Amino acid sequence: MCPHGGTVTAITSNARVSAASGYVVRASDTFTIAGCSFNLGGSPHPCLQVKWVQADQHSTAVGDSTLNEDSVGLCVAGDQAAQGTGMINSTQPRVSGT
């Protein structure tokens, strides 16, 4: 979620590595935000996407870092202004592999 109540949707280009019921998301995937109610000076200035600044340090999938509950993403508006830290409310179950 964005800090203003918007819902984040992950759109992954990963079609090779899956866990639980879906493909593993990576820092380079697209994360869009809908329903952000943030206003700046009375004008709508909603969060539109998440840009990840800290991904998982120990896991990669298809050549890019994966995300976990400790990952940090900044929610940004259409003009790329940072508007707060995204909140991770749910994750995939723990995964192990070889």
Image: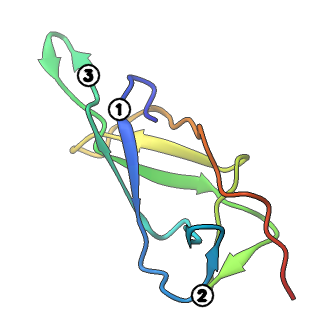
> Dot 3 lies on which element?
loop
Residue 75 spot, x, y in % from top left? 42, 40
Amino acid, disc 2: Val
Q: Mark 3 or 1 closer to N-term?
A: 1
Residue 1 spot, x, y in % from top left? 46, 35
Residue located 14% across and 10% down the image: 42
Residue 89 spot, x, y in % from top left? 59, 37
- Left or right relative to 10: residue 37: left
Quadrant of the rendering where the C terminus is positioned: bottom right
Q: Is residue 25 above or below residue 37?
A: below
Q: Mark 2 or 1 closer to N-term?
A: 1
Q: CA distance from mark 3 to mark 1?
A: 7 Å
Residue located 64% across and 51% down the image: 91
- Left or right relative to 98: residue 56: left
Q: CA distance from mark 2 to mark 1?
A: 29 Å
Q: CA distance from mark 2 to mark 3?
A: 35 Å
The tag on residue 62 is: 2
> Dot 2 lies on which element?
loop
Amino acid, disc 1: Gly
- Left or right relative to 79: residue 50: right
Q: Residue furthest top?
A: 42
| Residue linked to disc 1 | 6
- Are dots 3 and 1 in contact, CB under 8 Å? yes
Residue 18 spot, x, y in % from top left? 61, 78
- Left or right relative to 85: residue 61: right
Q: Nearer the viewer, residue 22 or 80?
A: 22
Q: Nearer the viewer, residue 83 or 37?
A: 37
Q: How many marks?
A: 3
